Image (cartoon, helix red, strand yellow):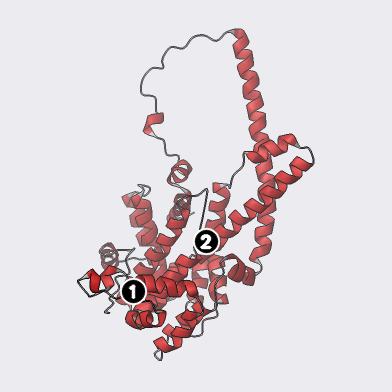
Amino acid sequence: MDHAQILYGRYHDLLISQKFAQQQIGYIHTLDIDYGEKLPARTLLEVEVIAHKKREKRDTKNHQYIADVNTQLHQLIQEEIDKHLLDVDYIFQEVIQIQDSIPAILDILAVKSASVGRIDPLVKDMHWLGEDILKLINLPQYRQEKDPKKVVKVDNPSLALRYIGLDNLKLVVPTFALKHWTPHSTFPFKLLKRKLWENGMAVAIASKALAEKSGVNPYHAFVLGMFHDIGKLALVRLYLRLFDSNWEKQSRDARDNGEKEKHTALSELSPDPLFLRNLMAEQSAKISALLLERMAFKYLPVTHAMNEIANNIKVEEVCPLAHVVLKARAFSHYKFLQKHVLIEPDEAKKLFAHYKMSVPELKTLSSISLQNLQLRIET
């Protein structure tokens, strides 16, 4: 396994949690280290030693049984996931619930003949998008009136679209779409929802910045950067949904059949971090490629590039658009790992070298915010 793959895996560990990521690389908390002699303890009585050994044996047997029940449960879940992943329409419409109007808007924005008038009716079909656009245009930083009392609130999505303008919509629509598709809850992985959202933003912004310096269409790069990981959104939603349904069925059956030990074991289980981590690391890119293909873009050429990323084509052989997004993804992962002290400087150098990133490109990415669209709106 090369260094880039190792860091790609570590990034997925960190998506689950910092503690999980630390465990995967053998991180030892300093508070767990014994720096001195152990405090003297009383000698156990012979009867206590026998009782302790019995408890240990019973606990080991109980833990193994819980592990076996967990394995059986997740085998069922994996079978259902595999079946659902064969049906792209189901993932597209039922799991993420992507409305066809989003690809249609993005396609319109990709052509020179784009106009707000062509986009307006599509936005009206999606109440949530109109609401998000209104919230955006009414933010204080986009209102020129200095006196807050004189500011007139924009309450018409059509007017808001005209204020925002086509150039800004190229950034706003993909951003709001990803936000809308991100799972509402990723419990018990509390921060996963925010991490997925922030990574999409970071890769999109970094992709656009690199594209502007390399002759690649910045809009194409931004959209692919924003959507390159939508497969994760699908897998997280699907796994958590299937865990709940299968767990409930297994618990109900165990109770009805009088399997008290199995019912007790099931009550100890919760969504498995390692299972979800492996699911995302191994399958998300290919699901992203299938979903982008399902969007059936006519004028937005991102599908081929996503397929190259999903198929792990060598960096030297991918198209310029795919290369831009791969570099943006690598830098985003680096910043994420760096923030949590999970990458060494020499590892970062190897990562950047693997993706053929130049010093000027790294300087460019280091100088921008990866969470701010930097919109310029005049109202």
Q: CA distance from mark 1 to mark 2?
A: 30 Å
Disc 2 marks a residue whose amino acid type is Lys
Above or below 112: residue 366: above
Q: Quadrant of residue 202?
A: bottom left
Up the image or down, 34 lies above or below 290; here it is above
- Of marks 1 and 2, the one in the foreground: 1
Could you tell me residue 249's position as x and y percent? 71, 49
Vertical relation: 360 (above or below) 65: below
Q: Can the viewer see residue 123?
A: yes
Q: Amino acid at mark 1?
A: Ile
Return the residue at label 1: 137
User: Where residue 166 is drawn, which disc sits there?
Assistant: none
Circle nearer the N terminus (1, 2):
1
The reply to whether callout 1 and callout 2 are in contact (CB within 8 Å) is: no
In the displayed image of the protein, which residue is found farthest to the left? 146
Q: Residue at x 27, y 62 (%)?
A: 366
Name the one closer to the observer, 168 or 304. 168
Q: How many marks?
A: 2
The answer to whether residue 49 is left or right of residue 125 is right
Please report the residue visible at 38 percent of the width from the left and 52 percent of the height from the top: 337
Q: Could you tell me which residue is drawn at 46 percent across and 71 percent down?
A: 177
Q: Residue furthest right?
A: 257
Q: Looking at the picture, how far across and down is residue 194, in whole percent?
A: 43, 57
Q: Position of residue 120 (x, y in %)?
A: 44, 84
Comparing 71 with 146, the one in front is: 146
Residue under numbered circle 2: 232
Q: Secondary structure at mark 1?
A: helix
User: In the rendered image, which quarter is residue 375 located in?
Assistant: bottom left
Left or right: 36 with respect to 293? left
